[in-house]
Amino acid sequence: MKETLLLNSTLTTLVENKKYNSIKDILLTMNPVDIAEIFGAVPEQTLSILFRLLPQDQAAETFAEMDSDQQQALIEAFSDKELKEVVNELCADDAADLVDDMPANVVKRILRQADPEMRRMINELLKYPEDTAGSIMTPEFVRLRPDMTVDQAIRSIRRTGLEKETINECYITDAKSCLTGTVSIRTLIVSGADEMIRDIMDENVLYVDVKEDQEQVALMFDKYNLMVLPVVDTEMHLVGIITVDDVLDVLKKETTEDMEIMAAMMPSDRPYIKTSVVELWKNRIPWLLILMVSATVTGFIITSFEDALAAYVVLTAYIPMLMDTGGNSGSQASVTVIRALSLHELEFKDMFRVIWKEARVALLCGITLAAVNFAKLMVFDRLGATVALVICCTLMVTVFVAKLTGCMLPMLAKRLNFDPAVMASPFITTIVDALSLLIYFRFATIFLGI
């Protein structure tokens, strides 16, 4: 971060002094990702000056890495000629993402400047639903025929390879464009020039359907250690490929989304620093309202047992401890299960195994906490044995119930096709708070006769 700020300051100074050659020398040595990060911190009026100093290929790569707000600012500053150069240098999937993020008036201008082939690929990608394999694939891949020789294949790659997303893996299709096999560039290099592609290709191809959920695609990349994965339609026509860099973006997005849901927030696609106060308010207030209203149940329970609290005022002092411990116990179980569900380590059929495991964990935790708390109540708080017993029995049962609730609700949510992350800490805590009070006052009624 310090290096970024220092470099940003240096570039701004060089722009002010019109030392453009020095700026170009610095930028040429940098990775497009780092350049995009630097550009994210420069003033808008300086951004277009710096961007125009980049060579065409580096400019397109940098543009693809920038935030949508910066991309829009640059597009508005571009001439039609400059926009045409940048758009047509982008990878098709990056161009589709750009169009998807821009307002309608900007989209029209982008499509007007895109070459016919680029425009066709953009429209093809945009027809697929969001969060599917089709929405993150690129149609720019190396396609070979099974009747080619190795020499013909290599010459074909030399002609078109620079325009493709990757050439590490080449795809063999038949006359109907159906996927029949793959061959790596390594295999091509070490094979004889006259060997036929059909003889050296791998016919055991991993592929994904164009409508498959992007999270499932990411799991396939993780399971099989893939760098690239072909995408086919229902008739096995090869329509594109997904590369690992796009999958990393998916994982980042899905992880962020789960974290926001678990914190009782509506997911947002925009970076925090770029999100307005009003948008953050809109994302956070719905769940806060729901949780606030549901928390009134807790107040109703306390009001219903106010006579018991009046008779034993000391019971009031331990309500926060019981509610907090129950909430924390439920959160531990829910977070563990939600994580296991997201990694597909658990399925709904495992519910009884999970309940049995969490029940034993809850019993051990409950007994330990109750024993320590009983000693503390007797030695330090000097409570009577009966009152201490009420508190400790409540603590033990609350921990038990909280952990079972915390493990069961995410699995039930998964079964009902809801995101298990919804059943996270805030939601679990609200439920357990009410349950802990009911348990507390029930034990007080039994042991203290109130």
Image (cartoon, helix red, strand yellow):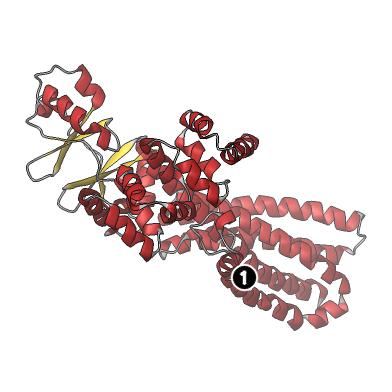
| In front of the other: 412 or 124 | 124
Residue at image mark 1:
288
Q: Residue at x 62, y 53 (%)?
A: 332
The amino acid type, in three-letter code, at marker 1 is Leu
Q: Within 10 angstroms of label 1, few (less than 14), some, or many (20 or more) residues?
A: some
Q: Position of residue 329 (x, y in %)?
A: 66, 56
Tally the marks: 1
Left or right of 198? Residue 164 is right
Where disc 1 sits, the SS reads helix
| In front of the other: 418 or 110 | 110
Q: Residue at x 45, y 37 (%)?
A: 32
Q: Residue at x 68, y 63 (%)?
A: 398
Please tell me whether residue 214 is drawn above or below residue 174 in the rendered image: below
| In front of the other: 22 or 99 | 22
Q: Residue at x 47, y 38 (%)?
A: 33
Which of the 4 image quadrants contains residue 263?
bottom right
Left or right of 361? Residue 45 is left
Residue 211 visible from this viewpoint: no
Image quarter of the N terminus: top right
Image quarter of the C terminus: bottom right
Q: Position of residue 391 (x, y in %)?
A: 79, 64
Please tell me whether residue 134 is drawn above or below residue 51 in the rendered image: below
Q: Position of residue 147 (x, y in %)?
A: 6, 31
Q: Position of residue 141 (x, y in %)?
A: 24, 39
Which of the 4 image quadrants contains residue 427?
bottom right
